[in-house]
Image (tube, rainbow, N blue to C red):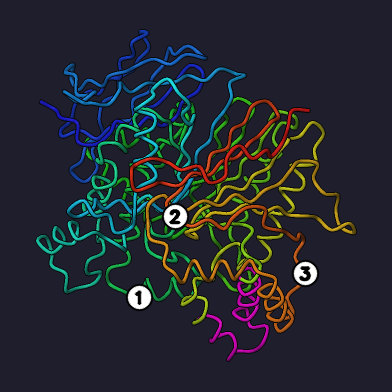
Amino acid sequence: MAGLRLGPLLRYTDGSSATVWVETSRPCTAEVRCADGAGGTARTFQVAGHHYALVPVSGLTAGTATAYEVLLDGARVWPLPDSPLPPSVIHAPGADDEVRVAFGSCRWAAPPAGGNDPVGPDALDALATRIAADPGGERPDVLVLLGDQVYADETSEAVRRRIDARRGLSDPPGGEVADYEEYTWLYYESWLDPEVRWLLSTVPSCMIFDDHDVIDDWNTSAAWLADMRATDWWQERIVSGLMSYWVHQHLGNLSPAELDADPLYAAVRDTPDATDLLRAFATRADAEPASVRWSYRRDFGRVRLLMVDSRAARVLDEQRRAMLDPGEAAWLRTQALDAPGSCDHLLIGTSLPWLLPHLVHDVEAWNALLCRGGKGARWARFGERLRRRADLEHWAAFPESFAALAGVIAEAGSVPDGPATVCVLSGDVHHAYAAEPSWPDDGPPAPAARVLQLTCSPVHNSVPLSIRLGFRFGWSMVARALGRRFTRHAGCPPTPVTWRRTGGPWFGNQLMTLTLRGRAATLGLEQARSDGTLRPVWLNVELASIS
């Protein structure tokens, strides 16, 4: 009899359809059966000895919520027997519904040893507890996870023990994950947490990778990549990382129509064992990043979310360095400007912040010009060492891409009947803040939309004192003046926008929530407390009002 190993995860939803992801213990037919008669079935596919299904659900009624159960070969496996948690539901949004978007990044998922969590309470656990206590109350309409869903390079004691028993810890990559099987252990550790498992079964989710899903500072530079490819373990890591991401995260990001049109997904379902097929796909994706698009678009009524791959899509050649390759940059512009007047709010999800504390931005821009050779070969070598040591690889470290994103945002925010807000949603930097850009009077027209950088991390991870002190100083006037000295040294051109911090910085395990109704928008930030609740820190801050 087939068992449920992982899931269910409610992924895509719209007014009539949804997808539900599961991993099972053996080949079987997975079924989602809703209380209102909606449902769907899918046969599992196999990858590296594991069995998965993404079940398409049809027949939902817009504006309603319905409880569902999961059956494997006709036997019910979800809800779990004797579960104290409420039934999982699928909410099919109505066209004019309010949309709540909760977002964050960086969730190190290791369970606490002996009840003592070394990195503090988990914000997803706290969110699940609140929703479970009041199933009919407010809940996010979508959970946007902006990277570092798993940590391939920072494993828990439990995972290291399993690695030691399987292959030992003495040879590289040591206690880091090495292959697909070990990646699955990270997802079990993360998604089998009882509260988080239930949360992901009842709140739709959108996901994108960041560096730790593969390795810290993934794709920092061409020199970094050459050094990694020279090792005898990197190729298996990157292929396994991309394979596991495609299976566990990427598939669920796509709509049923996109899945039906995806030749790789069709081939995976049609072959008895898709391992070699996915290995070939991941190998090509690594060797030719432009051959794959990990970015995607989701629409929630008149709210448009563009999730942007700011890791695998990079161009690393120092003379052509870009955060997004030309095809990816063109896709972003096309999607942001698609059907003018069709969205009230444009959200751009990128794991790495576009607007940083001023000193950090200036140092990264300065470093980028050094590494390009603007001050000679000796400075370039110094710049590369500094870039790796100080993690200088955000949008600011790709100056032309930073300016291009500013241009896309300005254009999207200026179209007739365009969005009321354009928000860049990011994580990565282990603190939270809001920043608002301004366009110079002598430049292109400023957008009519209100534009904000909204950064929130971590969901569950440590915030060392060095990060707290460094980022607090980075936002200061003294730091801003210091940053100008760096940019003058390298001859950096002026940025196309200036910006100011309008909220934060806040440190802790936390989530931000955007509430969007019509052309109105409010923002809140909540932090997880040791008693398992969420504490409001910044609540109901108005970003845009109904006009």
Q: Position of residue 320 (x, y in %)?
A: 63, 68
Question: What element does badge 2 sit on?
Answer: loop
How crowded pointer 3 is (Cα within 10 Å; few <14, some 14-19, many 20+) is rated as few
In the image, residue 510 sits, relative to residue 487, either above or below, namely: above
Check if residue 374 falls in the magenta segment: yes
Q: CA distance from mark 3 to mark 2?
A: 33 Å
**For the residue marked with disc 3, what is the amino acid?**
Pro
- Most extreme residue toward the front is 531
Q: Position of residue 165 (x, y in %)?
A: 9, 61
Dot in front, 3 or 1:
3
How crowded pointer 1 is (Cα within 10 Å; few <14, some 14-19, many 20+) is rated as few
Q: CA distance from mark 3 to mark 1?
A: 38 Å
**For the residue marked with disc 2, what is the amino acid?**
Gly
**For the residue marked with disc 1, what is the amino acid?**
Ala
Seen at 59% across and 24% down, the residue is 98
**In the image: residue 10, left or right of residue 8:** right
Dot in front, 2 or 1:
2
Mark 3 sits on what residue?
Answer: 494
The numbered mark, 3 or 1, whose residue comes first in the sequence reads 1
| Part of the protein shown in magenta | 360-384
Question: What element does badge 1 sit on?
Answer: loop
Seen at 26% across and 60% down, the residue is 155
Quadrant of the image occupied by residue 480: bottom right
Q: Position of residue 207 (x, y in %)?
A: 44, 43
Mark 2 sits on what residue?
Answer: 508
- In terms of secondary structure, what is the magenta stretch mainly? helix
Q: CA distance from mark 2 to mark 1?
A: 38 Å
Q: Which mark is residue 536?
A: none
- Most extreme residue toward the bottom is 378
Is residue 69 visible to the viewer in this orientation of the structure?
A: yes
Mark 1 sits on what residue?
Answer: 230
